[in-house]
Image: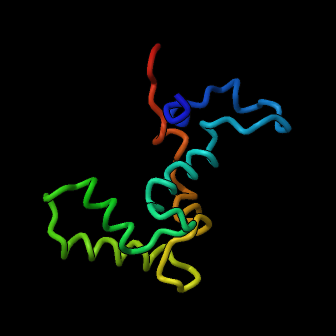
Amino acid sequence: MRTLAHFRPIEDNEKSKDVNGPEPLNSRSNKLHFAFRLYDLDKDDKISRDELLQVLRMMVGVNISDEQLGSIADRTIQEADQDGDSAISFTEFVKVLEKVDVEQKMSIRFLH
């Protein structure tokens, strides 16, 4: 249930909730942390090229060649990596997704 709670849409009446209360699991920040943890397989707080490749392979299977996946991983890290460590930190991950409507894209309407 906790996992599914990340995908619950944010209702209009929730946007003005008590700012001193706990942050809901479906907040933008928690959705971004959830997504980042899906890629950070070794839980070292950064996404390496190898981790990105593993996740891409899981997502696309054999539909794309290893060479193409490597190219996608390299380009992704090149675009997101701001500190030159050849990995994507959570801060860099958030920066790349700052213009993406994460709240909407990571929402599923279960029952209505």
The location of residue 105, given as percent across then percent down, is 46, 42
52 horizontally vs 89: left or right: left
* Residue appearing at x 44%, y 73% in the figure: 48
The location of residue 69, given as percent across then percent down, is 24, 70
Answer with the quarter of the image where residue 25 lies. Answer: top right
The location of residue 89, given as percent across then percent down, is 56, 70
In the orientation shown, which residue stands out farthest toward the right?
20
The location of residue 9, given as percent across then percent down, is 54, 30
Q: Is residue 33 above or below residue 77?
A: above
* Residue appearing at x 70%, y 28% in the figure: 14
Q: Is residue 68 above or below residue 6?
A: below
Q: Is residue 18 above or below residue 64?
A: above
* Residue appearing at x 34%, y 59% in the figure: 55
Name the foreground residue: 75 vs 69.
69
Q: Is residue 76 above or below residue 111?
A: below
**Number of numbered callouts drawn:** 0
Check the image and tell me how it is coloured: rainbow
In the orientation shown, which residue stands out farthest toward the front?
42
In the orientation shown, which residue stands out farthest toward the bottom?
84
Answer with the quarter of the image where residue 50 lies. Answer: bottom left
* Residue appearing at x 44%, y 21% in the figure: 110
Name the foreground residue: 62 vs 111.
62
